[in-house]
Amino acid sequence: MNLILSIDQGTTGTRSILFNSKGEEVAKSYEEHKQFFPSPGWVEHDPSEIWLKTLKTIKDAVNVAKIEFSEISGIGITNQRETIVAWDKNTGIPLHNAIVWQCRRTAGMCDELKSSGYAEIFKKKTGLVLDPYFSGTKIKWLLENSEKIKRNLADDSLAVGTIDSWLIYNLTGNHVTDYSNASRTLLFNIQTGTWDEELLEILDIPKHILPEVRPSSDKETYGDTGSLFRESIPVAGNAGDQQAALFGQNCFDQGEVKNTYGTGNFMLMNTGDDAIYSDNGLLTTIAWKLDDTITYALEGSVFITGASIQWLEQGLGILEDKSELPDIMNTHPSTEGVYFVPAFVGLGAPDWDPYARGIIVGLTRGSTREHVIRAALESICYQSEDVFKVMSIDSGVDISMLRVDGGVTKCSPLLQFQADISNVLVQKPVITETTALGAAYLAGLAVGYWENLDEIKRNFLIEQEFLPSMESQKRDELLDNWKKAKNRSKNWIDN
């Protein structure tokens, strides 16, 4: 029994999943890692902890499947994208905690770059906006603020990369990334497919510390695991988590859209070989590179969605278990006017306001914990609708179907509310671990485990569909009130 191993390294934890040729899960293992918040708005992870827990999940999944490492045909990797790690390339020792994509420490740096007139050149070359979300200013901050990193740079022993690069280095010893992850750094020209000398100069980042950029499905492979396991296994597929989810959702054709409901929400549309630039706050990004062909995507990134549910559990302590959520939505069909804007680290697309902050509005004496919890769930759908609306405008496509995945999709009433508020058919596939599945597909295609995309499509199945049923007048009223609440989060000091 030959299988494909997928490593899905996310914001809150790492899972390793073994897939068979039908794209079915055979075994998986999951481990959470610690979150560090050294200052308000700052978020960090321990790279060594991430690697050790990745290694543990791999071994645990193999043990659960009761297979030998020799039965693994290839390894695919998918990762939290913009998070940055710096390490000593000679010893493999991290030089600083990873700076996480959610971290806002470089907001002032981004403001300075904007005021210096650089916003348009970054957008034109990278498809991105100048926001602390992306990796470039995080790397610049490390180079300016860490004495260890300064010494390693001077000694020519510094390596910097996104989490995929860190994992590939530990698996193979090679310093490599793929086109999708490179396109999230503010340093990669998505038209030429190269690290951009002008952008590197603006941010004062030397190119030699960055990884080699390779196709997302690499027939030459990124390297193999050598003696790390009992058998040497090729690492052959790699993509940022949201691009991997687009691939795992079988959105291979231009105009197809998926939405991942995780710590944040990420909606992507396949735009084929056309890099569409947004006038409404969406990102233009590389979806993947297969052989010699680059496929592009439009993306709307929402920073806090599932993380707001975690906050209700661990921060406020008003939610005991996520299994309660469907019942709460079913027994409380309305928030009774309560709106929750979870702008804990600012707002992402389409607003891009790093200074917005979370608020709950519309509370009355009759408001209950259930109303607040439902408001948090509805906020996930409202934020997705904000992205969905402008994606249709920018692409010129009348989007009629949305494929969904991620942990929150276990809550069926939420998916029905998404269908209602966006007035669109929502499809949930049988296999919801589509991020890991996408990475598996990319690796499997590279090593010949799957012959082509048609073979993959034949095994893709939809488990559930949600049709819109809300009256347009009610939809418009809810969206208007949401807009008012969001505006208050953006002007919370003035108001």
Image: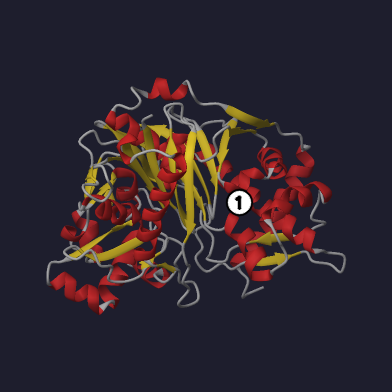
Q: Quadrant of the N terminus?
A: top left
Residue 451, image quadrant: top left
Give the residue drawn at x 55%, y 41%: 405
Residue at the spot of label 1: 383
Q: Nearer the viewer, residue 183 or 49?
A: 49
Could you tell me residue 399's position as x and y percent?
A: 57, 32
Crowding at mark 1 (Cα within 10 Å: few <14, some 14-19, many 20+): many
Residue 465, image quadrant: top right
Q: Is residue 311 left or right of residue 296?
A: right
Disc 1 element: helix
Q: Nearer the viewer, residue 178 or 116?
A: 178
Give the residue drawn at x 27%, y 71%: 95
Q: Is residue 428 visible?
A: yes
Q: Residue lying at the far right in this picture: please name it.
A: 366
Q: Quadrant of the C terminus?
A: bottom right
Q: Is residue 297 left or right of residue 381?
A: left
Q: Nearer the viewer, residue 297 or 161?
A: 161
494 to 243, vertically: above or below: below
Q: Is residue 83 left or right of residue 205?
A: right
Give the residue drawn at x 33%, y 34%: 71
Q: Residue lying at the far left in this picture: please name it.
A: 155
Give the residue drawn at x 36%, y 48%: 127
Residue 72, image quadrant: top left
Q: Is residue 118 visible?
A: no
Q: Amino acid at mark 1?
A: Gln
Could you tell me residue 480's position as x and y percent?
A: 71, 51
Could you tell me residue 56's position as x and y percent?
A: 40, 55
299 to 38, vertically: above or below: above
Could you tell me residue 351's position as x and y percent?
A: 53, 56
